[in-house]
Image (cartoon, coloured by chain):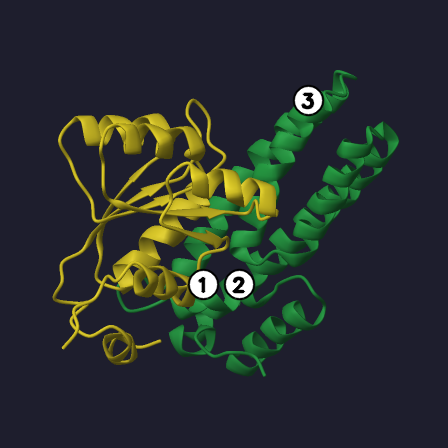
Chain colours: A yellow, B green
Amino acid sequence: MTRDQIAEELPNLAESKLTALVVDDSFVNQTIHQKLLNRLGIENDVVTNGKEAVDVYCSGRNYDLILMDMDMPIMNGIQATKRLREMGIESKIAGVTTRANEGEKKEFMEAGLNDFQEKPLTISKLLSILHKLNFYVQT
Amino acid sequence: MQRQVALIKQSLFDQGYLDEQFMELEELQDDANPNFVEEVSALYFKDSARLINNIDQALERGSFDFNRLDSYMHQFKGSSTSIGASKVKAECTTFREYCRAGNAEGCLRTFQQLKKEHSTLRKKLEHYFQLARQAGPKETARRPK
């Protein structure tokens, strides 16, 4: 998908200066997710587990969107999502995981997600997340 | 040379070594990251070598901690899925089924097959990337028919 096609899909996305936090313990997934976000012009950082995500927010950083993996050491995605919501964090959180059975998905959603996508993440799935979370400006 | 690269890539898909996720990664290659797929592949093989080593050690100890083995394999399956390593992913799924069934022999047998598929994929991708680099950037961006 070219930048022109992406721009057509989401008017003013490139100008919106969105920020995102990738939370995933896999270097492979971190690299792919960051590349996807870069392709859409979304400034992003990465952490390797839920605790680091919480610590980043405690340090005063804030992001429009969090891409949250479920299975991570130290603090998993469900725990991290619950913790962030308890802290009053209103960033949009999209769960991104290979775990897709209904029970696991429900548990993750109930932790406080705004959206859920099954891995592997692609440009289409990321656009779907952005659409759903209303990350664009209507012209 | 370019035709050879295209044929090699086509065969990797036709023989089921790679799936459409690999094409998704190729779509992300651009002037800023012309070797993105090769870099992600390198990360994958480094990461998966570590997981194979962990599982090997766990199996050699004779300890069939199926929960731990399943956890390793969950990670392995995750990264294999992300790169489009279709046959490796399938073996990961089979291994996890044997874990859930508490079937040690099945785990051992599947793990041998998994290592074989992983090694084959590694060699084929190394060869593909080497040729692709020699052929130039245009060929790697082209989708197989």
Q: Earlier in the sequence, mark 2 or mark 3?
A: 2
Q: Residue at x 41, y 36 (%)?
A: A111
Q: Which residue occupies the foreground of this view, B67 or B35?
A: B67
Report the disc number at residue A43: none
Which image quarter holds the C terminus of chain A? bottom left
Q: Is residue B102 something one can see in this rendering? A: yes
Q: Which residue is mark 2?
A: B21
Query: Residue at coordinates 40% horizontally, 53% vertically from top-left?
Result: A32
Under circle 1, the secondary element is helix
**How crowded is the residue under tag 1: few (<14 C-alpha within 10 Å), some, or many (20+)?**
many
* Amino acid marked by disc 1: Leu
Q: In which quadrant of the rendered view does residue A11 lie?
A: bottom left
Label 2 is found on which chain of the structure?
Answer: B
Same chain for mark 1 and mark 2? The answer is yes
> What is the chain letter for disc 1?
B
Q: Secondary structure at mark 3?
A: helix
Q: CA distance from mark 1 to mark 2?
A: 6 Å
Residue B74 lies left or right of residue B38; in this view the side is right
Mark 3, residues whose alpha carbon is within 10 Å: few (<14), some, or many (≥20)? few
Q: Is residue B69 above or below residue B74?
A: above
Label 3: chain letter: B
Measure how far apart labels 3 and 1 are at the Cα level: 32 Å
The answer to whether residue B45 shows anywhere in this view is no
What residue type is disc 3 on?
Answer: Gln
Query: Are dots 1 and 2 in contact, CB under 8 Å?
Result: yes
- Against B17, residue B115 (above or below) is above
Report the residue marked by disc 3. Answer: B57
Q: Secondary structure at mark 2?
A: helix
Vertical side of B67 occupied by B122: above or below: below
